[in-house]
Image (tube, grey):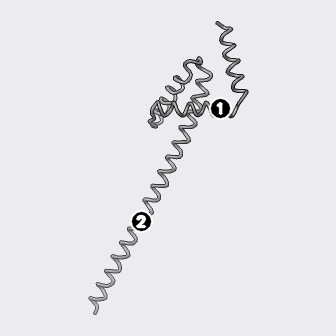
Amino acid sequence: MHDILLAFLQDIAYALASIGAAFLIAFLKKKIGVAGMQKLAEQSYLIKEVVRTGVKYAEQAFQPGEKAEKAVEWIVTTLGKKGIIVTEEEIKGLVEATVREFKDEFGEDWANAVKNKEITEETKI
């Protein structure tokens, strides 16, 4: 009788250990998944901010014909230094979207600022 009770308790202990291990694995997967999603969200935010900064930088530092190319170059380099690898094509799309966003956000002020800058540069020549 004692042997049967001992075997029964062992079986219960094994079952509880298995269930506990399953819950532990599920918890760890969930935790790692959440951390992975947080990392992805942080990277997306960083990419967006670097693109916005790159567009602003190119607008101030370069001539109209070279702004987009220089912005893409600077953005890819900056993100690469932070360990985020993106293609130039991806960045070109983000740059165009950001420029459109700025134009929509600033409307007439954007157009007037660009026009005034071009007129000023033409008179310098």
Label 2, label 1: how far apart the Cα atoms are: 48 Å
Q: Residue at x 50, y 47 (%)?
A: 39
Above or below 68: residue 9: below
Task: Give the image quarter of residue 95.
Answer: top right
For label 1, the SS is helix
Outermost residue, left direction?
Answer: 3
Q: Amino acid at mark 2?
A: Leu
Q: Quadrant where the C terminus lies?
A: top right
- Residue 61, given in percent of the width and then of the height, sits at 60, 20
The residue at 62%/22% (across/down) is: 60
Q: Which residue is mark 2?
A: 24
Foreground residue among 38 and 88 = 88
Q: Residue furthest bottom?
A: 1
Q: Position of residue 96 (x, y in %)?
A: 57, 31
* Residue identified by numbered label 1: 102
Residue 105 lies in quadrant: top right
